[in-house]
Amino acid sequence: MFDKILIANRGEIACRIARTARRLGVRTVAVYSRADRHAAHVARCDEAFLIGPAPAAESYLCGARILDAARRCGAQAVHPGYGFLSENPAFAEQCADSGIVFIGPPPAAIRAMGDKSAAKERMAKAGVPVVAGYRGDDQREDILRAAAEQCGYPLLIKAAAGGGGKGMRIVERADSFADNLASVKREARAAFADQRVLLERYLAAARHVEVQVFADAHGNIVDLFERDCSIQRRYQKIIEEAPAPGIDGALRRRLGDAAIDAAKAVGYVGAGTVEFLLDADREFYFMEMNTRLQVEHPVTEMITGQDLVEWQLRVAAGLPLPCDRRDLRIDGHAMEARIYAENPGNDFLPATGTLAVYRPPPMRDWLRIDSGVDAGDCIEPFYDPMLAKLIVRGEDRESARRRLRESLAAFDIAGVTTNLDLLHELTGLDDFIAAALDTRLIERNRDALLGGKGAPPDLFLAIATLFEATATEHQTPPPIGGNGGPFSPWSPGTPWQLNLPCEASCVFAAARSDALEYTVHFERGRAWAQIDGARCEVKLTPLAGGRFRFQCGAHARNVAVDKAADVIHINLGGRRCALTVVDAAKAADEHAGEHPVTGAGLSAPMPGAVIAVHVSEHQRVQRGAPLLVLEAMKMEHTVSAPYDGVVEELLFRPGDQVREGDTLLRLEAAGD
């Protein structure tokens, strides 16, 4: 076994690798960019080296700097985690040339599976089923368009060197082929430095099922069963589970055998995942092989009791696999939810900000949280926006689902927009409960998951108003001599005023609603509010760690209330609401001097870089026409014209950085 390894990654996977290494007595070395100087993975390793500026291309993707750090600290091996350089055969070769072990498969296997087109040809020859499509070397647009017509619509355009959901588009009609092709090529060039694409028939109701495989250098190879990864947005998984529901023993064996055949075909060694599409007729087709540890590997660990990072270290050190296929058993059911800094209501675009509150649910023996962030961390636009993975295990699928939903409801994050609400709603959908899974589940249930929710209920307004009325009491110790409780006139948090009605009024702003004014009345040491048209006694009692006991009439329940800047974040049993406290007088003054706003859709929906501009000044455009393209956190977003008009002024050029909310261009509406 190694004495010291360098972890060439960041975030939760770097912390997760360090955890296993520490248990095995292996010292760890972190690398970090200037943006990650205070990141969690730096603190959780024994040593750390600065390797460059914030952009990944100048730090985490710079193999020479990483290897220099490995040599300087005396690391015997480099673990690449996932993403960044984990599937880069040139980096694996550079490690070997430097006398440092690459904790991953041989460069030849990475290269063979990294080219998605060549990999599918190889799999077809090995007898592994593949989806029909075009995987040729001729990448001229007319050739690709002709191949698309032959393949038929809908189809997928995929980056030939892609993975992780990057460089992929569904094309429904021939008239949108060219735009989607250009977009995939841009994304592929930026993410993989390779703009080649492949085309394949899109299976609309397919499930995404993958098999974990592991091989050592002694000829041993096993599969550790399958995972279902069908719940996706933007072609990226957000909920995974193992074993895949509805897979019987015969189909499980067929999937496992095909995955092992795929790995053998490229002389595989180490951890890998063979991904398949499973159609309604229970036929499966090879998609790709990820030659690294997968984000969702914890669900496999939860049902097998194995530590896959330990297996990686053993195999890289030249040791045999710790067990064979006959020793592996499925024990229970596991689910994983990926918590992202993103806005599901804005096309899942990534979000940035500071984690004012980061409070995971209480730990249980069936709960695991893999995370690389802490409260106070700044979420930058440079890296993947995943904050944490919440993993649970149950005796069966339904108990795992209930535990996942319970844990999501108890996770509190403030300061950054996240997908927690979406995940909580997903786990309660009838389709999810019934395991009616496919890759378009979110799209099918879009209205239920992302539809407008209207004004916040009175319960949330009452909680926020009570919190504001007694905010000083929550934040400062009681005065010397004590106080008479939250509604004593001598309490620092009371709204009591001499010779005036005792009430607290607040004005709030919330998404999808107008400004809301709400009042709580105080009399004889009690508080009263209008809840759904009825006068009810209300009370908010502080507990600990951002928790309160909220009583409304005879009903009492626990609630989390946190304030970040001017925003009050409320989590009432998994129902979340964010209310901005508005200074009514100031808002009125500002509104009086307000200039007309720029047309809808013309401000930056996320921070990032302008990578393409499709229009010029004074150009006439039609509604829906692409204007420019933004890229951030490995995602590309096209800003389109919200109405017919003329481009008056372009405010940014390709390569410029923009902040969320920046006006990108001015578009004058066309006259009748």
Image (cartoon, grey):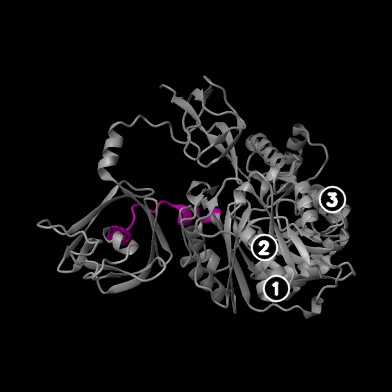
Considering every residue shown, the one lying at the far left of the view is: 499
Image spot of residue 20 (x, y percent): 70, 69
Q: In front: 58, or 158?
A: 58
| Residue located beneath label 3 in the image | 94
**In the visual, does 178 lie left or right of 91?**
left
| Residue occupying image coordinates x 30% and y 36% | 590
- Mark 3, residues whose alpha carbon is within 10 Å: few (<14), some, or many (≥20)? some
| Residue located beneath label 1 in the image | 23
Please tell me whether mark 1 sits on a helix, a strand or a loop.
helix
Distance of mark 2 from mark 3, alpha carbons? 24 Å
Q: Earlier in the sequence, mark 2 or mark 1?
A: 1
| Residue occupying image coordinates x 85% and y 60% | 127
Give the label, 2 or 1, closer to the camera.
2
Distance of mark 2 from mark 1, alpha carbons? 12 Å
User: Which amino acid lies under the numbered mark 3 shown in the image of this protein?
Assistant: Gln
| Residue located beneath label 2 in the image | 45
- Numbered range of the magenta stretch: 443-468
User: Which amino acid lies under the numbered mark 1 shown in the image of this protein?
Assistant: Arg
Please tell me whether mark 2 sits on a helix, a strand or a loop.
loop
